[in-house]
Amino acid sequence: MRPTQNGKVTLIELGFLILNILLITLVVRWAYYRYGWRGVAGFFAMYAFLPFVGFVLLYFMALIYTGNPYYPACRTGKCHRSDYQQERLGNGKRAVCCLCGTCYCKRGRRFLEVQPDGSVRRYMIWKAFRGWFPDA
């Protein structure tokens, strides 16, 4: 539950909180009557374990398809993933620009350098579980 900017919670968020508490209470009562304290402990273990499994799956998907870190170092090697800023180019497309002033765009697993005339040049490619490599 995320509070609004002034620190207050909306009525809809409060309703979802009450619904979650009600559902958890019902499941815990059912687990206790069906399996005893082991059922309650198992429910809470799964309640903590399932988000962990989801996080691990998303992390492996990033290692395979998108890259981790999401952006490689720039061509000069001075700027890294936290130095990139989103910018809109003159043709209306978006790109990320490093502190050196070079703009890049990402398409799938490829990281492309945007030229001043708007064309793109291959720069790096993400290879699953291995990292960023120069794209020849």
Image (spheres, rainbow, N blue to C red):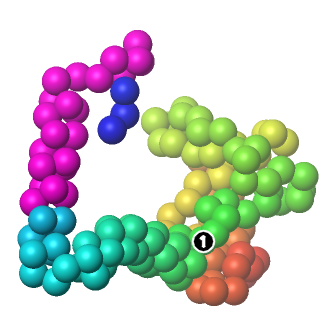
Describe the element under mark 1 as helix, strand or loop: loop
Asked if the stretch drawn in magenta spans residue 91, the answer is no
Residue 118 picture location, percent across and down = 59, 47
Q: Which residues are magenta?
A: 4-26
The quadrant of the image that shows the C terminus is bottom right
The residue carrying pointer 1 sits among few (fewer than 14), some (14 to 19) or many (20 or more) residues within 10 Å by Cα, namely many
Q: Nearer the viewer, residue 15 or 28?
A: 28
At x 72%, y 53%, the residue is 81
Side (left or right) of 97 relative to 52: right
- Residue 65 seen anywhere in this rendered image of the structure: no
At x 22%, y 32%, the residue is 13
Q: Which residue is mark 1?
A: 67
Q: Is residue 107 above or below residue 105?
A: below
* Amino acid tagged 1: Gly
Instruction: Give residue 98's quadrant in the image.
Output: top right
Residue 113 picture location, percent across and down = 68, 57
The quadrant of the image that shows the N terminus is top left
Residue 24 picture location, percent across and down = 19, 57
- Residue 4 seen anywhere in this rendered image of the structure: yes
Instruction: Give residue 112's quadrant in the image.
Output: bottom right
Q: Nearer the viewer, residue 68 or 18?
A: 18
At x 49%, y 37%, the residue is 91
The prevailing secondary structure element of the residues shown in magenta is helix
Q: Is residue 85 above or below residue 25?
A: above
Outermost residue, top direction?
A: 6
At x 60%, y 71%, the residue is 67
Side (left or right) of 7 relative to 91: left
Asked if the stretch drawn in magenta spans residue 17, the answer is yes
Residue 68 picture location, percent across and down = 63, 69
Q: Nearer the viewer, residue 122 or 69?
A: 69
Q: Is residue 29 above or below residue 33?
A: above
Q: How many marks?
A: 1
